């Protein structure tokens, strides 16, 4: 389809064209039911089959380790920032946070409203331009969990390795890089992600957690904020975001068709490699913001010599059909978000544009 934009939005972000076309084909009459999936009961067999398929497909992509459950929740990853301490940070305990950047800081802010926290590792002194060293974390005996942000969407850093936290559950906000590569779910007590980058449209938040963690909610918590409510009711305690869950299932099918997480990882390495190489080969015209070993394969952040030149870059890129290249308002600069669904050809076109821009303004 030739009228698709070169979409580098940070989230909501590009979805696979095949998924959009499939959804379009069954939009009005979902598999012979005479209605769209948005118009049917979430208690009916047709929706429930999709709901359960999405959960089992997700676990299958992660190797189906036993003892884990998938939840489909609402309120975005931001609600998880609060729900995690509400459910796990009980009296007498403290929660460790890896302070890696803007999103980690938002998670820390919420946890502090609930209870005792400590900083397990930080890269603040490096202005978050690298991931913190998590090689040898020292954890107190009363640690409830350790929270890490696998990919900082705004700064453009990404962990390659995760800490070993022993018997203390490791919890990861994977909102901006979930399913970009294989990872060992068994290392984690819980991972979660807002869907709107690598999993589907906004409206659903995916939680994958060890079953025993999902049974621990303190008695005083209101029903909707308790993990046990959602775990016991298969995420159907109240009306789920049914269309979003359906779309997640379709995106997961698409990931399977790409060769699963191994196939996706290979493509992501190629895509990110192409863009970082272009930045590094520009003789300093483009400058990557992040230290080499911490560079994200999902959010590529870079700068030009001046803010004026960056503004001009955004303007001319938009005229040339590129969308979403302006950096986050809090840090400035430029950012290309190249999630799973962004095609290689979009990045090839961007690299050509960058070369052209350098020749006319360098
Ligand atoms: N964590 C990370 C790493 C994110 O990138 C985002 C969204 N950009 C969030 C959390 C917040 O997600 P939501 O908007 O779904 O609350």
Image (spheres, rainbow, N blue to C red):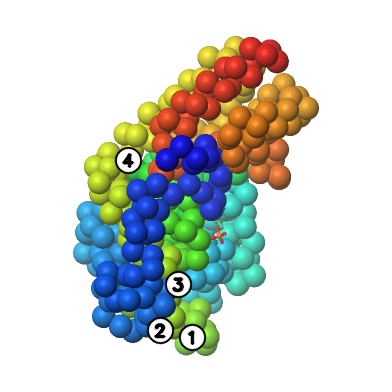
Disc 4 under 8 Å from ligand 1? The reply is no
The image position of residue 224, as x and y in percent, is 49, 82
The label nearer to you, 2 versus 3, is: 3
Mark 3 Cα shell of 10 Å, populated few (<14), some (14-19), many (≥20): some
Q: For residue 49, which quarter of the picture?
A: bottom left
Disc 1 under 8 Å from ligand 1? The reply is no
Question: Can see residue 119?
Answer: yes
Q: Which residue is under mark 4?
A: 264
Q: Which residue is under mark 1?
A: 223
Q: Answer with left or right where residue 103 lies relative to residue 182.
A: right
The image position of residue 316, as x and y in percent, is 67, 28
Q: Quick one: quadrant of the C terminus?
A: top right
Mark 1 Cα shell of 10 Å, populated few (<14), some (14-19), many (≥20): few
Mark 4 Cα shell of 10 Å, populated few (<14), some (14-19), many (≥20): many
Quarter of image, ligand 1: bottom right
Residue found farthest to the right: 308
The label nearer to you, 3 versus 1, is: 3
Q: Quick one: quadrant of the N terminus?
A: top left
Q: Which residue is under mark 3?
A: 241
Q: Which residue is under mark 2?
A: 237
**Residue at (58% x, 26% y) in the render:** 288
Please tell me which residue lies in front, 17 or 178: 17
Asked if labels 1 and 2 touch by Cβ distance under 8 angstroms, the answer is yes
User: Separation of disc 2 and disc 3 at Cα?
Assistant: 12 Å
The image position of residue 202, as x and y in percent, is 50, 61
């Amino acid at each position: 389809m030739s009228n698709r934009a070169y979409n580098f939005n940070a989230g909501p972000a590009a979805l696979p064209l095949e998924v959009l076309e499939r959804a379009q084909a069954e939009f009005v009459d979902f598999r012979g039911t005479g209605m769209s999936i948005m118009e049917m009961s979430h208690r009916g067999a047709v929706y429930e089959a999709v709901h359960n398929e999405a959960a089992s497909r997700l676990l299958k992509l992660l190797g189906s380790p036993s003892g884990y459950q998938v939840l489909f929740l609402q309120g975005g990853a931001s609600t998880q920032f609060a729900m995690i301490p509400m459910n796990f940070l009980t009296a007498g305990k403290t929660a460790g946070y890896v302070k890696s950047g803007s999103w980690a800081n938002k998670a820390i802010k919420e946890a502090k409203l609930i209870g005792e926290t400590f900083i397990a590792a930080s890269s603040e002194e490096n202005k978050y331009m690298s991931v913190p060293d998590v090689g040898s974390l020292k954890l107190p005996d009363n640690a409830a969990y350790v929270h890490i942000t696998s990919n900082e969407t705004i700064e453009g850093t990404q962990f390659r390795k995760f800490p070993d936290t022993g018997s203390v559950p490791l919890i990861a906000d994977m909102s901006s890089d979930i399913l970009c590569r294989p990872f060992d779910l068994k290392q984690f007590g819980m991972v979660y992600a807002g869907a709107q980058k690598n999993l589907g449209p906004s409206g659903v938040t995916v939680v994958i957690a060890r079953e025993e963690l999902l049974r621990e909610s303190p008695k005083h918590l209101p029903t909707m904020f308790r993990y046990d409510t959602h775990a016991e009711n298969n995420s159907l305690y109240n009306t789920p975001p049914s269309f979003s869950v359906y779309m997640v299932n379709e995106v997961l099918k698409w990931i399977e068709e790409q060769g699963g997480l191994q196939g996706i990882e290979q493509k992501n390495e190629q895509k990110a490699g192409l863009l970082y190489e272009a930045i590094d080969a520009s003789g300093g015209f483009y400058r990557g913001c992040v230290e080499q070993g911490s560079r994200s394969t999902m959010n590529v952040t870079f700068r030009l010599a001046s803010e004026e030149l960056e503004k001009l870059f955004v303007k001319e890129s938009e005229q040339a059909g590129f969308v979403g290249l302006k950096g986050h308002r809090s840090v400035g600069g430029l950012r290309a978000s190249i999630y799973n669904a962004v095609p290689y050809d979009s990045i090839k076109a961007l690299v050509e544009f960058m070369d052209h821009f350098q020749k006319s303004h360098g």
